[in-house]
Amino acid sequence: MGLSRNVSLWQGLKYQGQGPMLTFILHRIGGLGIVVFVSVHLLASYFGGEVGIFLNSVYEHWAFQLVVFFCALFHAINGLRIVILDLWPKLIEHQREAIWIEWAVFLPLYAMCVLVILRTALSG
Amino acid sequence: MEVTLKIFRYNPEKDKKPSYKTYKLEAVETDRVLDLLEKVKGYQDGTLSFRRSCAHGICGSDAMRINGMNRLACKTLVRDVGTRITVEPILGLRVIKDLIVDMEPFFDNYKKVMPWFINNDPPPEKERLQSPEARLRFDDTTKCILCACCTTSCPSFWGSDEYLGPAAFVNAHRFIFDDRDQAAAERLKIVNEVMGVSRCHTVFNCTLACPREIQITKAIGELKMALVTGVLS
């Protein structure tokens, strides 16, 4: 008797893990975003013709690029943080500061890219 | 001040689904969440079930999710969590009743890392001496009280209770880095299995949830490095 041990996605997302948990979730979303981008890219090459042109227009769209760039950049920088902490476990004591540095690197880089993508999109 | 306590309720003999019940009670900001639960059980609803023992942060019986995060009810003050408090059982273990979960899978994983001292040399006349520096190497991980706050905050454990979990790694670390112990290689082999340290995604939920402030992710990191380099110093 008793309730199942299964933890739903919603229950997991509601866990108040603070900053590190947010980076963990964004890392997974980032990974999925990269898979979607690469898949659309491959499918466009595979099908060619009208389907290929349509898929090209999807992943070349500025909104798609904003999302994909967020995913790829965050996944890369967060991955780098985890690799560094894994290689030098002593630094794990400063994991909070490591996350601040991660955001300090990510936000200006992403803001710059958003500016470039939007300027290109708006200038036609 | 008036505190609103929303508590997860589930009685397997009566309820098909769990529900939440809300209780209002008077408290002061230095009351602990455990005090509030005791007040509810004593004066408002005697059917409420939860585990508690020492009530001083040593026995680790009253681990629960308080406002969405794993904590010990006896170490959490009202002033730290506010006047609207939600109390739920820890995740990833079967709920038996209300806030009581089945701890067996947790202790099964704990036992897998052989959390006892192994040294086959004949015992010396007095104690087995150790330098203060060597003792300091695993000092942090001796503090574990097996409350399960860390393991049940870990997304990898939510996915599978076969995953050994942070508490088992902490206790493996405690013996692996003890220079008097002789079974480090065997324990490293256990933590290197499929459901071992490689499933740790460095989420840090365990470190933040630990009521003894053990640097759990750091201990797991040291285990990973020991596996890669084979060096324990």
Image (cartoon, helix red, strand yellow):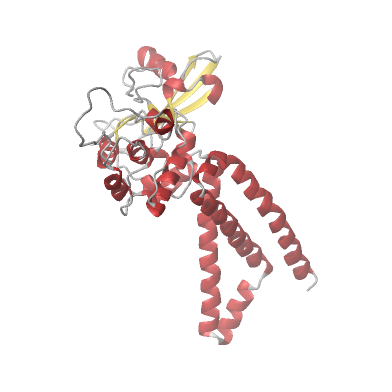
Where does residue A33 sit, x and y in percent of width and height?
54, 63
Taking the image as shown, residue A11 lies to the left or right of residue A74, namely: left
Residue at (44%, 17%) from the top-left corner? Answer: B36
Above or below, B224 relative to B115: below
Above or below, B15 relative to B187: above
Residue at (54%, 65%) from the top-left corner? Answer: A34
Above or below, A55 relative to A83: below
Q: Is residue B8 visible?
A: no
Residue at (30%, 53%) from the top-left corner? Answer: B193
Q: Is residue B132 visible?
A: yes
Taking the image as shown, residue B227 lies to the left or right of residue B203, namely: left
* Corner quadrant of residue A56: bottom right
Q: Nearer the viewer, residue B52 or B147?
A: B147
Q: Nearer the viewer, residue B62 or B126?
A: B126
Where does residue A9 sit, x and y in percent of width and height?
43, 49
Where does residue B146 sit, x and y in percent of width and height?
34, 31
Taking the image as shown, residue B31 lies to the left or right of residue B184, namely: right
Q: Nearer the viewer, residue B169 or B1?
A: B169
* Corner quadrant of residue B71: top left
Where does residue B205 sit, x and y in percent of width and height?
47, 40
The furthest residue to the right: A123
Assign the C terminus of chain B to one quadrant of the image: top left
Above or below, A42 relative to A22: below
